[in-house]
Image (tube, rainbow, N blue to C red):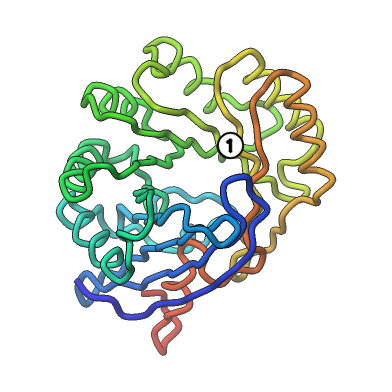
Amino acid sequence: MKILKCYYEECSYDSYFFNRQEGYRYLIEIDEKNHIETSVYLHYKNNIQQAIVVDISCMVGCPEKCFFCSSSKLEHKRNLTAIEILEETLLVLNQHQYSSFSNVVFSFQGIGEPSLIPKEITTAIILLRNYIPNSKITISTTGSNVKAFNTWKDSLLKDIKLQISITDYSIKDFKAIEHIVKHFEKHNMLESFAEIKFNYVLVNQANDTDSHLQNLISIFRHKPYIIRLSKLNHCIDNQYISSSVDVFNHFSEELSKNNITNYIFGSQIKSSIGCGQLIYLNNNQDGQVL
C-alpha cells in the first residue's frame, strides 16, 4: 500500500468548533487495480490546534449512490479488511505531527458504507485504539443495514459517535430515516453511543423546500438527536449546488423552534478534494476511472 498523490487545500470555516482547516486528501494504491482515498484534516480555532481528523475509506468504490457525492461515479470493487483499514489510516496519519494535537479523531467518512461491513469496522476500531488509546471515533453511515447498529452496540466499544446521513429526500416519505429512529428507540441506542447525529446536506431545489423541512420536524420533534445542516461540497461534473444562506438559517430557526437541537456546518464550496474526486480526476488515458 502506497501513496500516489496528495492534494492540499486550506479553507476557512464558519463553525463553532473551528474556523480554519488544512485538508490533505491522499490517493492510495492498494494494488495495481485498486485505489482508495483517505483524508487528513487539521482543525484550528483562532490559530490554536484543535484536532487532527482522519477520514477513512472502508471500500474500494461505493455501492451507495448518493446523488451529491462523487463516489457515486466509482464502481464498488471490494471491501477493505480491518488490517487494510489500519494500514491505510496509519499511512496518512504518519505524514503529520499528530502528537501535537490534543484530539485525534478517526472518522469512517471516506469512500464506502460502514453499515455493510459492521464486524470489520468493529475490528478496525479496536486496532486503531490499540495504536492511539485516547483517540475519538466517529462512524458516518447511511444506515442502509440497520442491524449494523446492534453489532456496534453489542461490541461494547466505548465513546463511539454515530453520524447518520439522510440520503432519501423524497417528499412523499422519509421512511428509511423513520425506520432508523424507531430502531434506535427500540434498542435503547442512546445508552450505548456517546452521540447520535443526523447529517442533512441542504441542496438547492432538491431537498430544501418547506415540505422537506416539515418532514424533518415531524420525525425529530421531541427526539434527543442532533441535526447537522451541511453545505454541499461541490463535486466535479455535479449539477447540484448548495442551498442559500437564507435557507440554512430558515431550516435552523424552525428546527430550534420545535426543540430540535441543530447546527449549521459549513464546508468549502467548489472543493477539488471532495470524496471520490481524486480517483475521478486520476483517469487513465482512455478516460476510464481507476
Where residue 51 appears, as percent x and y from the top left, is 43, 53
Amino acid type of the residue tagged 1 in the rendering: Asp
In the visual, does 122 lie left or right of 100? left
How far across and down, in percent of the image, does residue 162 sit?
42, 34
> Which image quarter holds the C terminus?
bottom left
Q: Quadrant of the N terminus?
A: bottom left
Q: Nearer the viewer, residue 276 or 67?
A: 276
Which x, y percent locates residue 81?
A: 18, 51
Say left or right for 97 vs 52: left
Does 93 appear above or below 5? above
Label 1 sits on residue: 168
Looking at the image, residue 216 lies above or below residue 17? above
Circle 1 Cα neighbour tier, 10 Å, few/some/many (<14 / 14–19 / ≥20): some
* Residue positioned 76% across, 50% down in the render: 243
241 w.r.t. 3: above or below: above
Residue drawn 59% across and 65% down?
235
- Residue plotted at (66% across, 16% down): 221
